Amino acid sequence: MKTLKMTPAFTLIEILVSVLILSGSIVYALQIHSQNHEQIIYISERSKLALQDSLFVSDTALAYHKEKKSAYDVLERYFRIDELKSREILKKIEREYYIPEAIQLSENEEGVPAAVVNEIKIKDKFSSSYFHFKINTF
């Protein structure tokens, strides 16, 4: 009778363990990709809205605490907008303001100006913050 010679091979358990390890690393790589994709979308949308936000940062912005304004409401005192289509576009662009309490920077050394710093938060799906500086003494 002839004996069969056994050759070394992977067992079913070893194959299953390697598949589990590979699938875990693939899931982890996909999670990282998903997080990066969300950040890329946020940054690109935020940069698109930065130009629109510039319509809302004016001298009068500090007076609009917790108010929702359209771009037309903010700009109408500075510009005369006669074209109806332009008015409608500006009226559709809206943001809500939130102005936290001002920060007083006092004069503590000679030659250093005293100033007031106001933060202007413009709330939307992709909110942003801007700062208004006013130097009181120099």
Image (cartoon, rainbow, N blue to C red):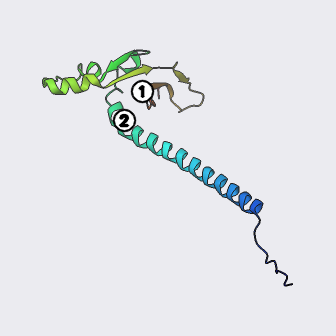
Point out residue 89 in the picture as x, y percentages from the top left corner: 23, 27
Q: Residue at x 37, y 17 (%)?
A: 68
Task: Please state which amino acid type lies under the numbered disc 2.
Answer: Leu
Residue at 24% x, 19% y: name it: 77
Q: Nearer the viewer, residue 118 or 80?
A: 80
Element type at mark 2 = helix
Q: Amino acid at mark 1?
A: Asp
Is residue 86 visible in this depiction of the protein? yes
120 is higher (above) or lower (below) than 31: above
Above or below, 67 against 111 in this view is: above
Q: Residue furthest front?
A: 1
Q: Residue at x 44, y 42 (%)?
A: 41
Q: Earlier in the sequence, mark 1 or mark 2?
A: 2
Q: In terms of depth relative to the viewer, which is nearer, 93 or 109?
A: 93
| Residue found 31% across the figure and 29% down from its top | 55
135 and 36: which is toward the camera: 36
The residue to which callout 1 is attached is 124
Q: Specify the quadrant of the image occupied by residue 121.
A: top left
